[in-house]
Amino acid sequence: MSEAPRPLNSTTRRTRITAMIVATAMFMQNLDSTVIATALPTMAKVFGYDPAHMSVALTSYLLSLAVFIPASGWVADRYGARNVFRIAIVVFTLGSVLCGLSQSLAFLVCARILQGLGGAMMVPVGRLLLLRTAAKTELVAAMAWLTTPALLGPVVGPPLGGFIVTYLDWRWIFYINIPIGLLGFGLVTRFIEDIREPPRGRFDLRGLMLTGIALTGLMFGLETLGRGVVPPWATQLMLGAGGSAALLYILHARATEAPVLDFTLMKLPCFGVAFTAMMLFRTGIGAIPFLLPMMLQVGFGKQAVESGLITFASSAGALVMKPVAQRALRAFGFRDTLIWNGAFSGIMLALCAAFRTAWPAAAIYGILLIGGFMRSLQFTAYNTLAYGDVPRARMSSATSLYTAGQQLAATIGVSAGAMSLQVAAAFSGHPSPEAMDFSIAFLVVGGLTGLAAPVALLMPKSAGDDLTGRGTVAPRAGG
């Protein structure tokens, strides 16, 4: 392109402010998801359930996100992105309060679903605000500004969750969202502009209902498959209903001018490849928040605070990558980065299968730190490349589809991890999962992660070069 690239890591003040404010909401969501993962074994004792069955507290939230996210783009265009973003923060915070007040697993699941409704609007609409604010040439740097503060959630979450569960009451893992939510609401009101685009056609209510049934049936069917939580016929019914609704939605989308999930976006080269690879990659990575704390506490017998401090290393590695993500993509290109970094990410995740209580802490920390470093670069590349060739008029549809795919993959990841763990324990004859059962589960999800790397071969070597200025000489940044 003839346009001179911006200096590395260069963004306008407006973009930085928008990114940091949106990151406040993502910080709250990421903090919540990692804190609860560390607290699941303790909550299982309180509610009287097997720890492996507590994955429903994660999947119910992720499922709620996946069900309601498809509507986010149309709602943002119709009512204004800032208004929707503010309301979403309020709903998420209210759901957090109700989670803290839960007296049963059923109540907790309902409160998590309400949280998911808030998160379903908060995350994609926040990303939409940033995408409409940032110029294309500053997109990589803008995503780094967005995701770096948001990654503080996973960094702070495990040790904070472990501390709360060990020394305080587990309910405070939800109450800590209250001040963050109030801060985010105030910052959005003060600094974010009301960005609005005319919605494409009427709201696709029939499509939303079909996708909701499809995702609910498939996800809960996978969640209960072979685990004895519900009768086998109930699992089969959910899977059948979910699969049927998915097929009906595909037929519906082909005959609808503006479907709630627009799969014609897959025809865009960058979006299609990034979306497909991201789904595979995130499926494997999505199991980590469930498997790792569970292995450390149930398999190794560590306290929640010890588990949190170890899990911290994985997110800390992700945080370290953000400042160098743009330089790495500029040096190696999106294609080569996604191939080799994706393959090594799968290997690093599979290495978690070798963890044992006799391992020195430094070795475990090292593997988790390097793995988090690589995963962070991979997600930054996917999240940037996906929007590189999306026209502005279709950006809201793209954020809805991409974010729905992210959450769907994460839900499948938790279910795949829990199912692998349950099956391994059943074949071994263990009444509760042991170290070897966790090893098998990590090998399964590591293999799923590695499958994403070959997908990048479908893109040209120059894909995304216009987003980083690769192949051109960037002016040196002053100061």
Image: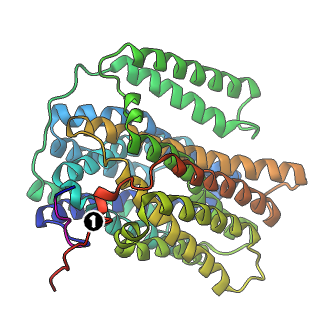
Q: Nearer the viewer, residue 300 or 11?
A: 11
Q: In the rendered structure, which segment of residues is drawn in magenta?
A: 3-7
The answer to whether residue 351 is left or right of residue 464 is right
Q: Which residue is mark 1?
A: 141
Can residue 306 be seen here? The reply is: yes
Residue at 52 percent across and 74 percent down: it is 312
Please state which amino acid type lies under the numbered disc 1: Ala
| Residue 103 at least partly seen | no
Location of residue 271 in the rendering, given as x and y in whole percent from the top left corner: 39, 43
Classify residue 247 by image quadrant: top right
In the picture, the quarter occupied by the C terminus is bottom left
Which residue is pictured at 73% across the width and 23% down the height? 233
For residue 402, what is the image quadrant?
A: top left
- Give above or below for 373 relative to 283: below
Q: x and y percent of residue 373 in the render?
A: 50, 72
Q: Is residue 274 above or below residue 340?
A: above
| Residue at 63% over, 51% down | 451
Residue 284 at x, y percent in the picture:
60, 53
Residue appearing at x 58%, y 35% in the figure = 219
Quadrant containing the N terminus in the rendered view = bottom left
Q: Is residue 245 left or right of residue 235?
A: left
Q: Is residue 453 magenta-colored?
A: no
Q: Secondary structure at mark 1?
A: helix
Q: Residues within 10 Å of mark 1 (few under 14, many from 20)?
A: many
Q: How many marks?
A: 1
Question: Where's residue 228, x and y in %?
Answer: 76, 38
Residue toward you, 304 or 76: 76
Q: Main SS type for the magenta part?
A: loop
